[in-house]
Image (cartoon, rainbow, N blue to C red):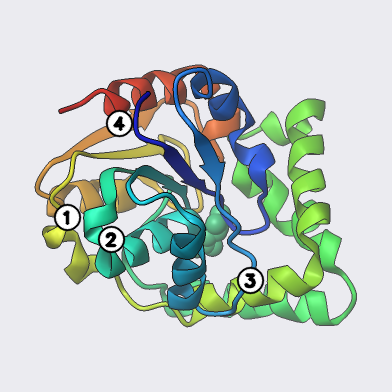
Amino acid sequence: MHEPLLLIPGLMCTAALFEPQVKAFSDDRQIIVADHTGADDMHSIACQVLAEAPDRFALAGLSMGVYLALEIMSAAPDRVARLALLDGKARPDTADQLAARHALLKMADEGRYLNITYDVLLSRLVAAGRSLEPELRDTIVQMATDTGVAVFRRQMAAIINRRSYLADLRNISCPTLVLTGQVDEITPPECAREMAEHIPHARLELISGCGHLSTLEAPHEVNAALRHWLHET
Ligand code: MLT
């Protein structure tokens, strides 16, 4: 049996984000989708994830899951056999990005939690036009519904107050995959390039025509990249 694979979802996402990967890889290894809902700061969430994780594992996070994976790399690097950073960034937010986050929190305070998905995020989370695909759309809306407003507030607080992870990147020494959709609007390819350039053993993969939710948008390509990464020595 191979090392277990620990997957950490993004903001307002659940295990459904990784359904194609769980299907593809659970025959030959244990797969755990982390609970990233239990605190309102990145370090505490990372500690909660580590408390539930096996001794040593392959670690893949998507977006908010990348912030958490980088927290784990600084808290417990010896427990991570290999690292995959999907659709994320290590750099801090710009002032405009921070203001946009506070605007989303305000929508939640006004009782418009699901409008965050319908009116703001849906079209930005996936490549142009794909938010109209019923299956993709339903999955995204269902994940937001299942997450709920209380968890959204905690996750957003953790994202707003996170530190920059740029200085941590050079300390990562395990085999690392950095993967991003070529048309990811939320964490564009320049963020992936930046991480790959600063991590000593990183391989960069950009998926053409794919937006921010690569695991759902391009499962075939993402699974091929992950399969290669899982067997890298
Ligand atoms: C996510 O998908 O987890 C979030 O978009 C992350 C972020 O907003 O930085």
Q: Identify the residue at image location x=50%, y=71%.
A: 97
**Helix, strand or loop under label 1:** loop
Using the image, tell me which numbered label, if any, was put on residue 205. 4
Q: Is residue 98 visible?
A: no
Asked if labels 3 and 2 touch by Cβ distance under 8 angstroms, the answer is no
**Helix, strand or loop under label 2:** helix
Dot 3 corresponds to which residue?
38
Dot 2 corresponds to which residue?
73
Relative side of 115 to 180, left or right: right
**Disc 4 residue crowd, few under 14, some 14–19, many 20+, Cα 10 Å:** many
Relative side of 154 to 168, left or right: right
Amino acid type at mark 3: Gly
Q: Which mark is nearer the camera, 4 or 3?
A: 3
**Screen quadrant of the N terminus:** top left
Amino acid type at mark 1: Ile
**Helix, strand or loop under label 3:** loop
Q: Identify the residue at image location x=51%, y=35%.
A: 31
If you read the primary sequence from the N terminus, does the residue marked by circle 4 or circle 2 appear first?
2
